[in-house]
Amino acid sequence: MRYFLHLAYNGAPFFGWQVQPDHPTVQETLERSISLLLHKEHIDVTGCGRTDTGVHAADYYAHIDLEETLSPDGCRQLRDQLNSFLPKEIVIYDVFPVQPRAHARFDAVERTYQYFVSTHKNPFTFPQRYFSFRAPDMKRMNEAAKLLLDTEDFTSFSKVHTQVNNFLCNVTHAQWTQEGDDLVFTITANRFLRNMVRAIVGTLLDVGFGKTSIEDFHNIIHQKDRCKAGNSVPACALFLTTVRYNWPDIKTDD
């Protein structure tokens, strides 16, 4: 039987999602915990995406395969046991059965990330914010962000040495909003490349601070050269906030 885990995690103490030798990761922590609880040698946990070191996930899905069938009470029991066993930075919201071929990564049709920029010092939120002494021009940044909706190739905003077949993404939403003292950049796409959101945010901030014109931003996109774009902003302020599925195709009738 295949089961989905709905979870969230604070990425600060982890070296990203994917298992790495000699470094704590979210995937490794989950696999070790589930295997110990179920008295199995090893249970693979497949995630809906690979977040980088220090990136957070407020909405995340993963799948596991178990030999036994869990009742609804069994799913709730596994959830509660995991929450008592896992470190405080990871929470399991739900465990539920899915179709045998359902895949946490490949069946995700859309993902949304948010990046938080604070223009006022706050001793309580600073670990998860990128602080700027100056407020960038949000109107100019949103003008530039609109260009992302007509972009297919995001080579300029991806790490160069990455294992992907192409750099094509379909961005359906990209906008800055003001939320209290924070400027929040929200971006939705069918897929994301490594470092893509942080590179886009860094380049858009250059536009907001007048270092880069909107025409320059347009040219950066079409040059398909990561060296032309701005610096990547820190990972601490980036959150995966929504992962969307066609649930009727995923969930079982149980």
Image (cartoon, grey):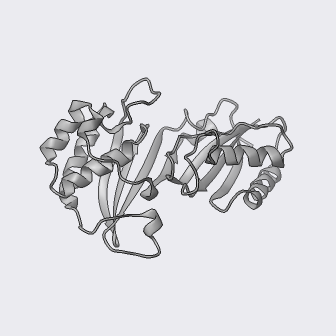
In percent of width and height, residue 118 lies at: 34, 67
Name the foreground residue: 146 vs 156. 156
Is residue 142 in view from this perspective?
no
Residue drawn at the location 25% of the way across and 51% of the way down: 204
Q: Is residue 12 visible?
A: yes
Residue found at x 71% / y 49%: 95
Asked if residue 117 is positioned above or below residue 35 in the image, the reply reads below
Q: Nearer the viewer, residue 180 or 234?
A: 234
In the rendered view, does 102 fall on the left or right side of 114? Answer: right
User: Residue 32 at x, y = what percent?
Assistant: 75, 45
User: Which of 166 and 72 lies nearest the eye of the viewer?
Assistant: 166
Q: Quadrant of residue 80?
A: bottom right
In the rendered image, the residue lying farthest to the top is 165
Looking at the figure, which quarter contains the C terminus? top right
Q: Position of residue 185 (x, y in %)?
A: 34, 56
- Residue at the right extreme, as displayed: 39
Relative to residue 243, is residue 109 depicted above or below? above
